[in-house]
Amino acid sequence: MEIKHKQDDNKGAFIAEENGAKAGEMTYSKAGADKIIIDHTEVNPEFNGKGVGKQMVLAAVDYARATGIKILPLCPFAKATFDKNKDIQDVLV
């Protein structure tokens, strides 16, 4: 599984791909210079149960740690992932 990160001015996404097929996408909006808001996570049905969503959340955590920003998970899936994993809560707003 490969997670790609793309961003433009105020929005961005982490896109999961496997063998060239899009497995899922998690989108966010920037909120100022030091915060992103995860607003949607979607996993394609054929990849359900493979941890794709969690991998995208972890990619966002790595990005936040590397750039010194914080994450506000408004997406229910992302929020649940943060709630279940204490070791990644250091990047929460």
Image: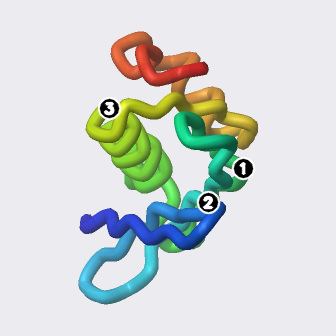
Rendering coords of residue 33 (x, y %): 56, 42
Residue at the spot 60% in from the left edge and 20% down from the top edge: 93
Q: Give the farthest residue toward the bottom.
A: 20
Give the secondary structure at mark 1. strand
Q: Position of residue 20 (x, y in %)?
A: 30, 88
Q: Position of residue 83 (x, y in %)?
A: 57, 17
Image quadrant of residue 90?
A: top left
* Sooner in the amino-acid sequence: mark 1 or mark 3: 1
Foreground of the two, 28 or 48: 28
Residue at 56% from the left image edge and 32% from the top image edge? 71
Display coloring? rainbow
Dot 3 amino acid type: Arg
Asked whether, in this view, residue 48 is left or right of residue 39, the answer is left
Q: Are marks 1 and 2 in contact (CB under 8 Å)?
A: yes
Q: Nearer the viewer, mark 3 or mark 2?
A: 3
- The first of marks 3 and 2 along the sequence is 2
Alpha-carbon neighbours of circle 2 within 10 Å: few (<14), some, or many (≥20)? many
Callout 3 secondary element: helix
x and y percent of residue 53 in the render? Answer: 49, 50
* Image mark for residue 14: none
Three-letter amino acid code of the residue under disc 2: Thr
Please report whichever mark, 1 or 2, sits nearer to the chain's N-terminal start. 2
Mark-to-mark CA distance, 3 and 2: 18 Å
Query: Furthest residue to the front?
Result: 33
Q: CA distance from mark 1 to mark 3?
A: 19 Å
Residue that numbered label 1 is attached to: 39
Question: Where 60 falls versus 6 (above or below)?
Answer: above
Residue position for label 2: 27
* Label 3 crowd (10 A; few <14 / some 14-19 / many >=20): some
